C-alpha cells in the first residue's frame, strides 16, 4: 500500500477515475486532491511529510496533481461519473 502525503485531516472518501489513472480524495481538511496513480509506486511507502500545506504541491510528492480547497466545507464524498466528471459534496455549516 502507498501513503499519499497531503491531507491534514481524516480522508472520508476516495474514488478512481474510469480509466484508473487518477485518484480523487476528499477530506475533513476542506480539500479535494487529485493524485496521479500512474506515477505512483504503490509498493514503496515513503515517510509521511508533515510539512505539507493545503494548496501547495510538495516537491517530494510527484503523484499530487492538484489540490482544490473549499471555503468552509469539509468534503464528505467524491465520485467520478461515467463520463469522468468529478463530483464532490459536503455539509455546509455556518
Image: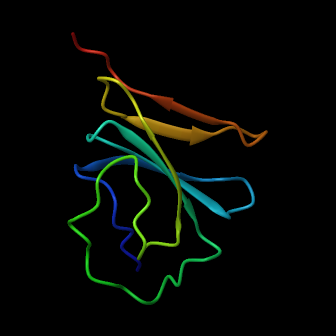
- Closer to us: 75 or 67: 67
Residue 19: quarter of image: bottom right
- Closer to us: 81 or 32: 32
Colouring scheme applied when the structure was drawn: rainbow
Query: How many discs appear?
Result: 0
Residue 70: x, y in percent?
39, 29
Q: Name the side, left or right, on which 59 lies relative to 63.
A: left
Which part of the image, by quadrant, shows the N terminus? Answer: bottom left
Which part of the image, by quadrant, shows the C terminus? Answer: top left
Residue 44: x, y in percent?
42, 90
Q: Name the side, left or right, on which 59 lies relative to 37.
A: left
User: Looking at the image, is 76 positioned above or below residue 36?
Assistant: above
**Residue located 32% across and 25% down the image:** 73
**Residue located 26% across and 74% down the image:** 48
Residue 81: quarter of image: top right
Residue occupying the far top of the picture:
94
Residue occupying the far bottom of the picture:
44
Residue 74: x, y in percent?
30, 32
Residue 83: quarter of image: top right
**Residue located 62% across and 59% down the image:** 22
- Closer to us: 52 or 7: 52
Residue 12: x, y in percent?
33, 45
Residue occupying the far right of the picture:
83
Amino acid at each position: 500500500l502507498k501513503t499519499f502525503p497531503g491531507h491534514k485531516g481524516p480522508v472520508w472518501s476516495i474514488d478512481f477515475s474510469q480509466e484508473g489513472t487518477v485518484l480523487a480524495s476528499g477530506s475533513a481538511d476542506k480539500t479535494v486532491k487529485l493524485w496521479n496513480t500512474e506515477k505512483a509506486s504503490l509498493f514503496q511507502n515513503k515517510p509521511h511529510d508533515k510539512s505539507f500545506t493545503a494548496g501547495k504541491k510538495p516537491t517530494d510528492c510527484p503523484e499530487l496533481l492538484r489540490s482544490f480547497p473549499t471555503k468552509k466545507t469539509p468534503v464528505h464524498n467524491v465520485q467520478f461519473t461515467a463520463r469522468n466528471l468529478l463530483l464532490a459534496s459536503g455539509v455546509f455549516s455556518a
